Image (cartoon, rainbow, N blue to C red):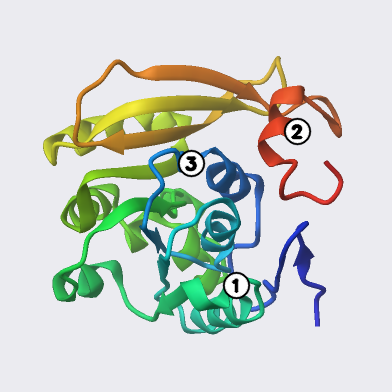
Amino acid sequence: MSKPFQFKHFSVNQNQCAMKIGTDGVLLGAWTSIEANPFSILDIGAGTGVLSLMLAQRSHAQVIEALEIDDQAYEQCVNNFEQSPWSDRLFCYHASLEEYAEEIDDTYDLIICNPPFYSETYKTENSQRDLARFQDAMPFGHLLESVVNLLSENGLFSVVIPFSEEQNFIVLASKVSLFPNRITRVKGTPSTDIKRSLIEFSSSKTDILTSELIIETSRHDYTEDYINLTKDFYLKM
């Protein structure tokens, strides 16, 4: 039995999940804005449930719901929710986004997603991991169409994607009348290429606030920006 991933205020078991906790998810959970005090949050493709747990820690949202299609990941997510200090506010549905978007009339003030994003060329021998990682499990266009149906009028949608997909994703979002308000581009070190884009969308067109986040200056020598963003979560920050 592998040890749970220990954060400051909760722990996450991940031995049944294809996608383990990584920098992308933690960055998204810490970066996502809760300034509007969302009452209801939806986490699409929850995996371990780490995004929901981070937002339960950060916000006063009364309804935090997660969707997970993979059987084992769903079971693990439920278990992680039950063991957390916020079990009364967390709920995971075992459903696809498509099924859920069709059946649910509720809308959410905040929707968050760390979507699968590897192209066909990366297929491995592990089909569970592939399902978690591949865009063919959740194409961006389909994701955005569901998001726009589930988002409340003034709601925010927060996502992390490869930087190489940023323009494509923004164009797809504009087709369903979602527009970027805030973009942070993430680099591993000052000299490496931009790897990820954290993007916040809403239905209002505003001036886009853009910034850059560098994770470390050298191996394990983390930047102040990165420490400030993640210190409420990581034990060693």
Local SS, label 3: loop
Residue 218 location, x and y as percent? Answer: 84, 24
Please determine whether, in this image, residue 46 is positioned above or below residue 215: below
Task: Determine the CA span between mark 2 and mark 3.
Answer: 16 Å
Q: Quadrant of residue 228?
A: top right
Residue 115 location, x and y as percent? Answer: 42, 53
**Disc 3 + disc 1, Cβ < 8 Å:** no
User: What is the total number of numbered labels drawn onto the structure image?
Assistant: 3
Indicate the quadrant containing the N terminus: top left, top right, bottom left or bottom right.
bottom right
* Callout 3 amino acid: Thr
> Disc 2 designates what residue?
227
Instruction: Report the side of 135 relative to 20 (left or right).
Output: left
**Disc 2 + disc 3, Cβ < 8 Å:** no
Please determine whether, in this image, residue 127 is positioned above or below residue 115: below
Residue shown at 49% from the left, 72% from the top: 90
> How crowded is the residue under tag 3: few (<14 C-alpha within 10 Å), some, or many (20+)?
many
Residue 11 location, x and y as percent? Answer: 73, 68
* Callout 1 amino acid: Cys
> Disc 3 designates what residue?
32
Indicate the quadrant containing the C terminus: top left, top right, bottom left or bottom right.
top right
Instruction: Report the side of 177 relative to 125 (left or right).
Output: left
* Callout 2 amino acid: Ile
Of the two numbered discs 3 and 1 on the same chain, state the one appearing first in sequence: 1
| Mark sitting on residue 17 | 1
Instruction: Report the side of 189 relative to 113 (left or right).
Output: right
Residue shown at 49% from the left, 79% from the top: 74
Local SS, label 1: loop
Q: Nearer the viewer, residue 148 or 166?
A: 148
Residue 3 location, x and y as percent? Answer: 82, 73
Task: Determine the CA span between mark 3 and mark 1.
Answer: 23 Å
